[in-house]
Image (cartoon, rainbow, N blue to C red):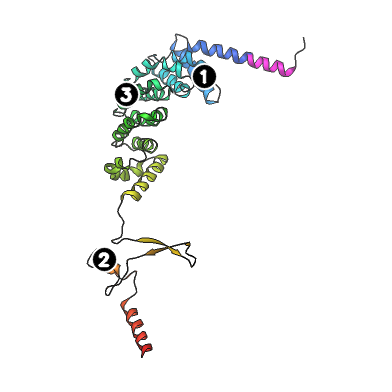
């Protein structure tokens, strides 16, 4: 029987891939921790190249309860990437994830919360909120950062829980660790950007910690501080400035915008001089108005013409 070269090559490739899958599935279900670890490393390598490895989810999720730290970390790395694709299967292991929230290693606690918040099932939203509330006050900043990242995920899944999430954000804004605070600001920006009142008591702390944040955190924080300053700070002038549109002959508003200062009628000196006399701006008197000598010279010239 003659077989085309291309079809023969595809047949060999398909057979090789199927054999590789069987060997990998066998290693994942092995009772030997070393074989499990090798199989998980191969699986993570396949995942990093962009291959679809969601078919191994049942074999991997069985290893969540393993005592080996290396095996557990690799299992959670896999589950974080695939939990959204297999929400029903991940839901079956929710008890194991909750148990790992009390694991002595902070990395395992953070990964367990990441997996729980990645399961796109509305029925577990209350469970995830309880987990986030617990991790928001965790001694490890790594776990608190994971809690801040979980808040927007819960909000996208169920927006009706906004008030509960705002309470968590208010708690996390008190954090004094830069990379935790930057994640809390990211959650604030997505969940409740209009609640600027939550920033009042933390504004000075945010200004001090801005330089210690990473680049992405600095961008988020700078935007928030800029918005806060524009909406909450008083005007720096001691008088009110008014903007008016100049109108042409036809009554239509022109593009030019004129800045009008208060009228200077009612005695010598302008409004700026009267407002700043004796105050902190006294040294700048006359900056926006003409000098008295110019006024005198103008009046003399006018008088001469009258004569």
List the residue tagged with mark 2. Answer: 275
Q: Quadrant of residue 107?
A: top left
- The residue under the point 32% across, 45% down is 207
Q: Residue 197 in the image: x percent, y percent?
A: 30, 42
Query: Residue lying furthest right in this view?
Result: 2
Nearer to us of marks 2 and 1 is 2
- The residue under the point 43% across, 24% down is 118
Disc 2/disc 3 C-alpha distance (Å): 57 Å
Q: Quadrant of residue 102?
A: top left
List the residue tagged with mark 1. Answer: 54
Which quarter of the rendered picture does the N terminus lie within?
Answer: top right
Q: Residue 98 in the image: x percent, y percent?
A: 35, 18
List the residue tagged with mark 3. Answer: 130
Disc 2/disc 1 C-alpha distance (Å): 72 Å
Query: Residue lying furthest bottom in this view?
Result: 307
What is the secondary structure assignment of the residue under circle 1?
helix
**Taking 222 as reference, is 294 above or below it?**
below
Read off the magenta span.
3-14
What is the secondary structure assignment of the residue under circle 2?
helix
Label 1: how many residues lie within 10 Å, few (<14), some (14-19) or many (20+)?
some
**Taking 128 as reference, is 222 above or below it?**
below
Disc 3/disc 1 C-alpha distance (Å): 28 Å
Mark 2 touches mark 3? (CB < 8 Å): no
Q: Residue 290 in the image: x percent, y percent?
A: 34, 74
């Amino acid at each position: 029987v003659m077989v085309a070269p291309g079809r023969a090559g595809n047949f060999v490739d398909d057979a090789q891939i199927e054999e590789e899958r069987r060997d990998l599935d066998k290693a994942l279900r092995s009772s030997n921790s070393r074989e499990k670890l090798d199989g998980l490393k191969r699986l993570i390598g396949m995942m990093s190249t962009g291959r679809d490895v969601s078919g191994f989810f049942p074999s991997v999720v069985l290893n969540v309860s393993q005592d080996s730290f290396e095996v557990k970390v690799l299992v959670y790395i896999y589950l974080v990437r695939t939990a959204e694709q297999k929400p029903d299967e991940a839901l079956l292991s929710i008890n194991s994830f909750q148990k790992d929230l009390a694991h002595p290693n902070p990395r395992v606690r953070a990964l367990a919360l990441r997996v729980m918040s990645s399961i796109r099932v509305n029925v577990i939203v209350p469970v995830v909120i309880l987990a986030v509330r617990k991790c928001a006050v965790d001694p490890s900043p790594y776990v608190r950062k994971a809690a801040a990242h979980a808040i927007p995920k819960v909000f996208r899944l169920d927006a009706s829980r906004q008030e509960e999430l705002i309470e968590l954000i208010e708690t996390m804004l008190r954090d004094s660790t830069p990379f935790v605070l930057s994640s809390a600001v990211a959650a604030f920006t997505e969940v409740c950007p209009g609640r600027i009142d939550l920033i009042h008591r933390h504004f000075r702390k945010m200004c001090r910690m801005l330089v210690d944040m990473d680049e992405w955190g600095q961008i988020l924080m700078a935007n928030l501080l800029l918005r806060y300053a524009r909406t909450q700070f008083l005007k720096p002038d001691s008088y009110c400035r008014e903007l008016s549109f100049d109108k042409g002959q036809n009554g239509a508003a022109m593009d030019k915008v004129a800045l009008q200062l208060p009228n200077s009628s009612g005695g010598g000196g302008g409004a700026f001089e009267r407002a700043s006399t004796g105050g902190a701006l006294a040294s700048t008197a006359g900056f926006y108005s003409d000098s008295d000598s110019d006024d005198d010279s103008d009046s003399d010239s006018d008088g001469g013409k009258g004569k």
